[in-house]
Structure formats: C-alpha cells, structure tokens
Image (cartoon, rainbow, N blue to C red):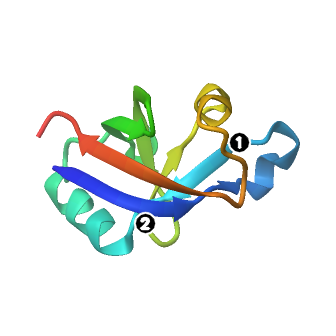
Amino acid sequence: MLVDFEAKLWIWDARKGESWTFVTLPAEESEVIRELTAGTRRGFGAVRVKVSVGTSHWQTSIFPGGEGYVLPVKRAVRVAQKLEAGDVASVSVEVLGL
C-alpha cells in the first residue's frame, strides 16, 4: 500500500525540548493501514514503512496517534529538505510486509 499526501510538520509536546518532529497520515488511509496490518503490528502498534520526502528516502515505522498514524521525520531529512515545524511536506509512505 502506497500513501501520498501533504501534511504539516509538528513537534511532539511531550518532547518539545528534543524537537521530535512528526507528520500525521490522513485518517482514512490510517484506518485502511490498521485493517491491513491487524495481527502483524510491532510494539506500540508500529508498522514498518519506506518513506520519501523530496529527495530523501528512508525506512522507519509509523505509530498510531490520535487522528491517524504518525510518522517521525528525522532531523537529517528536515535539514536536507529545508523543513521546519509548521512547514507542509509532500510525503510518500509505502507500507512494508503486506
């Protein structure tokens, strides 16, 4: 499953001092991912994914959040793509292992 979307980068309130930065996947696609990965998720409900933001590509996990899955966007990617919290990023997420 491949999900292409645009989302605003935000900092996790519980770790503001450490600038953990995320985007939230769309709610509808998050629900489909939950259904497709039932019984195969990892700790904390994590789902392995391959991600692209601009020219940056990496593998990580998405995690269940309030409105949908959340994707951590690491500092190296934010620097390479000139993104900061509050900016909108074009993101492509491919769910692995389906």
Q: Label 2: which residue?
A: 68
Tell me the amino acid under the disc marked 2: Gly
Q: Is residue 11 left or right of residue 36?
A: right
Name the spot of residue 12 as percent of width and height, x first.
Answer: 71, 53
Residue, x 55% and y 42% (percent of image)?
Answer: 72
Q: Earlier in the sequence, mark 1 or mark 2?
A: 1
The answer to whether marks 1 and 2 mark residues whose Cβ atoms lie closer than 8 Å is no
Q: Residue furthest right?
A: 17
Q: Is residue 2 left or right of residue 8?
A: left
Q: What is the quadrant of residue 31 in the picture?
A: bottom left
24 lies above or below 50: below
Q: Quadrant of the C terminus?
A: top left
On residue 83, the disc is none
Q: Label 1: which residue?
A: 20
Residue, x 32% and y 46% (percent of image)?
Answer: 93
The span from disc 1 to disc 2 (Cα, nearest Å) is: 17 Å
Tell me the amino acid under the disc marked 1: Trp
Name the spot of residue 74 as percent of width and height, x first.
Answer: 60, 32
7 lies above or below 73: below
* Dot 1: element: loop
Name the spot of residue 92 as percent of width and height, x first.
Answer: 34, 47
